[in-house]
Image (cartoon, rainbow, N blue to C red):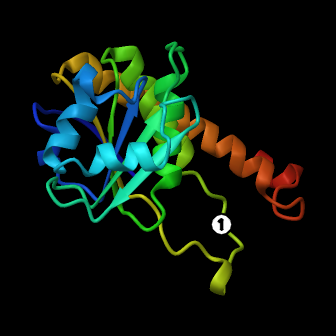
């Protein structure tokens, strides 16, 4: 999985398999990312919000596939709830990667940008992509994985790159611990742990 930040002014030009956007409000008249995307989609997003009764409540999601008007193949809007939390960027990126289904590339638009939110989003994306599939074969073996995650921020800085590098180190350690826990005891016995 490759994670990088990318500065962008227009969400409609982000060329990715799945564009994931986190929002606190489903009201298009407030402007912001939903209004920009709805304009690009010719009102299709507003119609989907109405039909699906999307309110941007925490945990709510809205998916539009084959979205003409934007470069992304699929648009997924995640509700974040009214109040921001420190863990929000991590959960948004994790949910985006897990919702990717058959998509290889995902772009996650963060509601706010700082080195800390970028680090948490990178941690979430890596955590969401974790699968212990060492012994899975045939139909049980995962056929798909997200190979590229872009964290979309307003401007690129060295602090963001350092935050992503730090997140990768932390998540590699967490993935190792998860592998050790998930490994069967005949593979991960004391002698194997020692080596």
Specify whether 56 is left or right of 157. Answer: right
- The image quarter in which residue 117 lies: top left
The residue drawn where x is 37% and y is 24% is 118
The percent coordinates of residue 70 (x first, y second) are: 16, 53
- The image quarter in which residue 39 lies: top left
Please state which of residues 110 and 24 is positioned toward the viewer in this rendering: 24
The answer, for residue 86, to whether it is visible in the render is yes
The percent coordinates of residue 2 (x first, y second) are: 33, 48
Residue 72 vertical position relative to residue 125 in the rendered view, above or below: below
Q: Which residue is mark 1?
A: 133
Q: Residue furthest bottom?
A: 138
The percent coordinates of residue 41 (x first, y second) are: 19, 50
The residue drawn where x is 39% and y is 52% is 1
Please state which of residues 160 and 69 is positioned toward the viewer in this rendering: 69
Please state which of residues 18 and 36 is positioned toward the viewer in this rendering: 36
**Element under disc 1:** loop
Could you classify mark 1 by the number of other residues whose Cα lies within 10 Å: few (under 14), some (14-19), or many (20 or more)?
few
Residue 135 vertical position relative to residue 52 in the rendered view, above or below: below
- The image quarter in which residue 147 lies: bottom left
The residue drawn where x is 37% and y is 30% is 165
Please state which of residues 99 and 133 is positioned toward the viewer in this rendering: 99
Count of numbered labels shown in the rendering: 1
The residue drawn where x is 17% and y is 24% is 156
The percent coordinates of residue 173 (x first, y second) are: 59, 36
């Amino acid at each position: 999985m490759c994670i990088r930040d990318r500065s962008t002014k227009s969400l409609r030009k982000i060329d990715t398999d799945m564009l994931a956007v986190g929002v606190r409000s489903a009201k298009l008249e407030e402007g912001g990312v939903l209004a920009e995307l709805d304009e690009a989609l010719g009102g299709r997003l507003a119609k989907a919000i109405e039909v699906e009764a999307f309110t941007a409540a925490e945990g709510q999601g809205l998916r539009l596939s084959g979205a003409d008007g934007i470069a992304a193949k699929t648009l997924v809007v995640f509700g974040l709830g009214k109040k921001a939390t420190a863990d929000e960027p991590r959960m948004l990126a994790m949910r985006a990667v897990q919702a990717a289904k058959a998509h290889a590339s995902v772009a996650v638009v963060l509601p706010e940008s700082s080195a800390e939110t970028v680090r948490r989003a990178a941690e979430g994306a890596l955590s969401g992509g974790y699968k212990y599939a060492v012994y899975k074969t045939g139909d049980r073996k995962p056929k798909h994985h997200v190979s590229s995650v872009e964290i979309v921020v307003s401007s690129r800085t060295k602090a963001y790159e350092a935050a992503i590098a730090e997140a990768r180190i932390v998540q590699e350690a967490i993935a190792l611990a998860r592998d050790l826990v998930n490994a069967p005891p005949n593979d991960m016995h004391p002698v194997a742990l020692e080596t």
